[in-house]
Amino acid sequence: MHQAEFDALYARERPSLVGYLRFLGLAAPEAEDVAQEAFVRALATPGQLGEVANPRAWLRLVATRLVVDRSRRARIARVNLPRLFQRELPEMADVAGTGLLVRRAVAKLSSSARAVVGLFYLADFSVSQVAAHLGMSESAVKATLHRARRELAALVEEDTFS
């Protein structure tokens, strides 16, 4: 991938990638950092990104892995800081408040469920792609999606009627 192509990719995909990372629960500065790191990795492997059919999906995959790695490192180190995936999601424009309810509910999911939901619904990965990218079996992805949908429905209903 040539520099001009990379610059165009960066300008086109950075805002979307940061929005995706904010959906996963990262604060704005962290989302910017992770997005930047994903693009740094793309620069470090220029041949790989140039051969990818869907650069947006590749960048989201790399960013998701970076978020999961950060979460694992925090758990392993047993740092007494708020966990990365337990932050409230940022306010974003939505229709009649529904988006905010969903984002609040997603923020309450486990980090692994959030990664599966994010890749499946936001990055438009298939079940098999999510499984391959997260190192899970397809049945585990399906089960996680099933549990997440059920949990999200209950959380949204609870938030709506409380």
Image (spheres, helix red, strand yellow):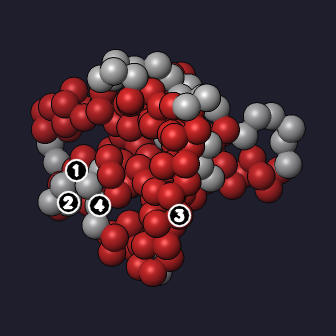
Q: Quadrant of residue 87?
A: top right
Looking at the image, is mark 3 or mark 2 earlier in the sequence? 2
Q: Are marks 1 and 2 in contact (CB under 8 Å)?
A: yes
Looking at the image, is mark 4 or mark 1 earlier in the sequence? 1
Q: Which residue is mark 3?
A: 147
Q: Quadrant of residue 158?
A: top right
Question: What number is the disc on residue 125?
Answer: 4
Label 1 neighbour load within 10 Å: few <14, some 14-19, many 20+ = some
What SS does tag 4 mark? loop
What SS does tag 1 mark? helix
Q: Which residue is mark 1?
A: 55
Question: Which quarter shows the C terminus?
Answer: top right
Foreground: disc 4 or disc 3? 3
Spatial separation of the CA atoms under disc 4 and disc 3: 18 Å
Q: Quadrant of residue 15?
A: top left
Q: Which residue is mark 2?
A: 52
Q: Are marks 4 and 2 in contact (CB under 8 Å)?
A: no
